[in-house]
């Protein structure tokens, strides 16, 4: 990448200051960072942006006769795992929460599109030629009978420069080479978090033979119908339960990322912890937190009302039971208070 390509890559004019270079770099890096941009070309684009910024800084330092300024702290990823050719591809894999807890294996395949080797991805060759529209003058006159009486204007084809770059015939001006297919298998370990990166080697089918490609696999988490994942690896789940079963402290079956588990409801308790059923981590396996929502009918029908009446009679109506004795003592004290 030469200095002219670097200016075009950052959208800057020749002679810009280091501050302008840094501002343009930050703006483009924020847009093309692979963490924010899902385009398959985002990683290659951020590499070109970094290279262009370095090239302009070296050019400015050489003109000023001063040591080269250190590059700004990159807001990009750590140094990628690369092959001997220096290229690294990127592939995104979406896994379920259950697979994140237990680990899984995935077969990956896709297409690799690299920069054109003939033009270094620019789409044009580095050499300059005279513009065909203005004959190298940078100015054009309108096509009229008396064109010598009209004033000339800047040539739009070359922006008044008088020279243009020849389009690369190898890539037809796209700057991209022919797509090649790759394939590999990646082992996702248990405890993998969303946003984690796995480095693997993929096989790329070339014209003559296969070769290895360094592939950076980004992990995404699929939305789950009832599980949510906390930052510490705790898995949370909210589920409705029968209000009468909750009052009776019955056993129910609840979901966890490692399969269904039996859990006993506790009257008055709404949050329950199932240890070791969350996401594995450095400190061990996190827990699964279950929040229950007891459901009761808004209105009791005749049958439910009869059952409630019998429960009341059996609970506080029987004077021999502890609740019955306590109610009897309260009634006696209450009647005495009313009599006064």
Image (spheres, grey):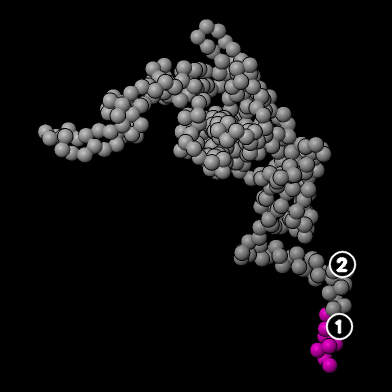
Whole-angstrom CA distance, mark 1 to mark 2, is 18 Å
Q: Residue 321, position in %: x, y? A: 87, 67
Q: Which residues are magenta?
A: 331-340
Q: Secondary structure at mark 1?
A: helix
Say which residue label 1 marks: 333
Residue 58 image label: none
Judged left or right of residue 57, residue 128 is left
Look at discs 1 and 2 and give the one toward the viewer: 1
Disc with the residue nearer the chain's start (1 vs 2): 2
Give the residue at x 33% y 34%.
160
Residue at mark 2? 321
Total labels drawn? 2
Q: Quarter of the image holding residue 143? A: top left
Q: Nearer the viewer, residue 70 or 251?
A: 70
> Crowdedness of circle 1 by 10 Å Cα count: few (<14), some, many (20+)?
few
Q: Residue at x 61, y 15 (%)?
A: 212
Q: Is residue 110 above or below residue 260?
A: above
| Percent position of residue 254, x then y | 71, 44
* 27 sits to left or right of 235: left
Q: Nearer the viewer, residue 28 or 82?
A: 28
Residue visible at 61% across and 65% down in the picture: 299
Q: Residue 237: in sight, yes or no?
A: yes
206, 192: nearer the viewer: 206
């Amino acid at each position: 990448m030469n200095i002219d390509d670097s200016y075009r890559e950052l959208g800057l004019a020749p002679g810009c200051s280091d501050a302008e270079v840094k501002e343009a770099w930050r703006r483009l890096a924020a847009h093309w960072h692979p963490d924010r941009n899902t385009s398959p070309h985002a990683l290659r684009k951020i590499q070109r942006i970094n290279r262009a910024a370095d090239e302009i800084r070296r050019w400015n330092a050489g003109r000023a006769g001063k040591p080269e300024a250190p590059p700004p702290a990159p807001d990009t990823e750590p140094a990628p795992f690369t092959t001997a050719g220096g290229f690294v591809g990127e592939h995104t894999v979406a896994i379920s929460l259950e697979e994140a807890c237990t680990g899984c294996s995935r077969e990956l395949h896709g297409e690799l599109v690299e920069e054109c080797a003939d033009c270094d991805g620019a789409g044009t060759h580095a050499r300059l030629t005279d513009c065909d529209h203005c004959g190298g003058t940078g100015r054009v006159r309108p096509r009229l009978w008396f064109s010598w009486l009209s004033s000339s204007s800047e040539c739009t084809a070359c922006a008044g420069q008088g020279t243009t770059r020849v389009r690369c015939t190898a890539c037809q001006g796209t700057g991209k080479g022919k797509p090649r297919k790759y394939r590999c298998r990646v082992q996702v370990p248990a405890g993998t978090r969303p946003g984690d990166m796995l480095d693997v080697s993929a096989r790329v089918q070339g014209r003559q033979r296969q070769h290895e490609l360094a592939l950076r696999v980004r992990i995404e988490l699929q939305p789950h119908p009832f599980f949510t994942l906390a930052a510490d690896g705790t898995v949370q789940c909210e589920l409705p339960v029968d209000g009468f079963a909750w009052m009776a402290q019955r056993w129910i079956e609840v979901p966890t990322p490692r399969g269904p588990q039996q859990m006993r409801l506790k009257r008055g308790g709404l949050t329950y912890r199932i240890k070791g059923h969350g996401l594995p981590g450095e400190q061990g396996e996190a827990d699964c937190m279950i929040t229950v929502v007891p459901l009761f009918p808004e209105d009791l029908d005749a049958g439910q009302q009869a059952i409630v009446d019998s429960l009341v009679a059996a609970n506080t109506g029987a004077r021999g039971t502890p609740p019955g004795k306590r109610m009897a003592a309260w009634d006696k004290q209450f009647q005495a208070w009313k009599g006064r």
